[in-house]
Image: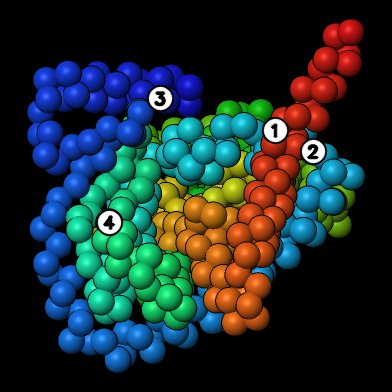
């Protein structure tokens, strides 16, 4: 089933359920519709009042968070300013990461986001972490919270808390900025914690010397014999083998042109293959005089070492990992990080320290990934993003002190509008360029 079929089925199911609820007026006090978006809300929000007892530490946390948000906002704006001119000069084709489907962060539609429990749980918890940050700081700053809920358009696309509008309008300066910045702060802090937890978990796993064939070289003996990737070699010429060293010891005694019998297991089924060995290709090790099967193995030890090098990047490691889904699912898993994101055949080359280990790793990764990206995106100074409201409040208070309040709205609109145009260009340029080329070619 293609991604388009998955998307259409999800849309159809959601539409039928939404129409049924709306037409029959079910749960009218809890469910509202804003066009195609369904909002499920509750007014039972009194538990947020408890956080007023922690007013001092939470204010300190939120104040430090505001500093972090301003830095991230400046970084994201600078990244847009640097990326867009490069994209205008060298516009890529709308394929791979620039494929139109990858604009949408919908699991199963976006090629980099698989349909897994870890993805859905990570996305939902990310939204909750963000919105609870706003609600908690609203109460800390004596702004009432009227309701909370989630927004659904086929899948959960957001969550919301509804602070009292009069209280928000009455708030000025840092109390208001802290409230707007709390969601971003929570996301970034949670993202860093989850990625740190993921590295700790992977450090507990032990690489095994399982002779797992990751792939075969085209036009060489293993490929010609039909050996499939991600098969585990279990024997050569009737001799059982359990690791790559035992295979190498046997292969060192062979010569090009010699026929061998190889047994390998995949998906619980063991198959036997007959290979006529070839010479080693020059690009690999042309000086060897032993026979060459034409396989390459998954190296769990090297992967763990690579992950250790990534972890050594410190706070830059999470930024590095933001591209892991793109590499794993779109660009051929060149960094060998797909094992962190979803179930893969490579897991048999690792000793798991406890049950459901890889599921826990996957959840930690996606929680970290979604939190970090949601936090960074919301920091962009565009109204109605949180970063935009923080920029708006900062500009208004600054201009108020200078006695230039009448100019504040124009400045806010100019900044927000300019950054919005940059963001739209970044997203749409590959598609617009492809469309122009098609029209010119057709004419």
* Tag in front: 1 or 4: 4
Q: CA distance from mark 3 to mark 1?
A: 20 Å
Residue annotated with mark 1: 95
Label 2 Cα crowd, 10 Å radius (few <14 / some 14-19 / many 20+): some
Label 4 Cα crowd, 10 Å radius (few <14 / some 14-19 / many 20+): some
Give the numbered dot on residue 116. none
Closer-to-camera residue (60/252): 60
Label 3 Cα crowd, 10 Å radius (few <14 / some 14-19 / many 20+): some
Q: Is residue 420 above or below residue 24?
A: below
Q: CA distance from mark 4 to mark 2?
A: 41 Å
Residue annotated with mark 2: 92
Q: Name the residue: 36% across, 23% down.
A: 11
Q: Position of residue 99 (x, y in %)?
A: 64, 33
Q: Name the residue: 36% across, 70% down.
A: 170
* Tag in front: 4 or 3: 4
Label 3 SS: helix
Asked which colour scheme the image uses, the reply is: rainbow
Q: Are marks 3 and 2 in contact (CB under 8 Å)?
A: no
Q: Is residue 425 above or below residue 410?
A: above
Quadrant for residue 270, please give it.
top left
Mark 4 or 2 closer to N-term?
Answer: 2
Q: Is residue 225 left or right of residue 437?
A: left
Label 1 SS: loop
Give the numbered dot on residue 162. 4
| Quadrant, the C terminus | top right
Q: Position of residue 441 (x, y in %)?
A: 88, 14
Mark 3 or 2 closer to N-term?
Answer: 3
Q: Position of residue 287 (x, y in %)?
A: 86, 57
């Amino acid at each position: 089933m293609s991604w388009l079929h998955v998307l259409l089925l999800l849309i159809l199911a959601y539409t039928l359920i939404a129409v049924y609820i709306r037409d029959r007026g079910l749960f009218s006090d809890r469910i509202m519709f804003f066009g195609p978006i369904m909002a499920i809300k509750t007014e039972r929000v009194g538990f947020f009042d408890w956080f007023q007892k922690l007013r001092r530490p939470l204010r300190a946390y939120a104040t430090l968070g505001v500093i972090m948000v301003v830095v991230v906002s400046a970084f994201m704006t600078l990244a847009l300013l640097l990326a867009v001119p490069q994209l205008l000069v060298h516009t890529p084709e709308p394929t791979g990461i620039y494929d139109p489907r990858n604009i949408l962060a919908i699991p199963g539609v976006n090629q980099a986001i698989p349909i897994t429990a870890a993805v859905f749980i990570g996305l939902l918890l990310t939204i909750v972490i963000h919105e609870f940050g706003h609600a908690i700081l609203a109460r800390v700053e004596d702004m009432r919270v009227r309701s909370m809920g989630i927004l659904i358009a086929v899948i959960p696309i957001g969550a919301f808390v509804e602070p009292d509008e009069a209280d928000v309008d009455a708030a000025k300066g840092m109390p208001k900025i802290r409230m707007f910045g709390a969601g971003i702060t929570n996301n970034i802090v949670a993202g860093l914690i989850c990625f740190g937890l993921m590295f700790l978990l992977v450090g507990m796993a032990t690489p095994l010397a399982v002779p797992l064939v990751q792939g075969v070289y085209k036009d060489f003996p293993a490929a010609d014999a039909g050996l499939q990737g991600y098969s585990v070699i279990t024997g050569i010429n009737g001799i059982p083998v359990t690791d790559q060293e035992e295979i190498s010891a046997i292969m060192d005694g062979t010569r090009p042109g010699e026929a061998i019998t190889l047994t390998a297991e995949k998906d619980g089924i063991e198959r036997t293959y007959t290979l006529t060995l070839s010479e080693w290709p020059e690009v690999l090790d042309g000086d060897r005089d032993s026979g060459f099967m034409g396989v390459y193995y998954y190296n769990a030890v090297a992967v763990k070492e690579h992950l250790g090098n990534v972890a050594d990047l410190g706070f830059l490691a999470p930024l590095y990992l933001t591209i892991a889904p793109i590499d794993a699912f779109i660009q051929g898993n060149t960094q060998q990080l797909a094992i962190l994101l979803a179930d893969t055949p490579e897991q048999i080359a690792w000793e798991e320290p406890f049950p459901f280990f890889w599921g826990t790793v996957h959840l930690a990764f996606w929680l970290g990934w979604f939190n970090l990206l949601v936090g960074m995106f919301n920091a962009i100074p565009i109204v109605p993003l949180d970063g935009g409201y923080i920029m708006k409040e900062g500009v208004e208070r600054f201009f108020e002190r200078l006695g230039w309040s009448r100019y504040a709205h124009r400045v806010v609109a100019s900044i927000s509008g300019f950054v919005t145009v940059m963001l739209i260009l970044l997203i749409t340029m590959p598609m617009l360029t492809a469309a122009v080329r098609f029209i010119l070619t057709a004419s």
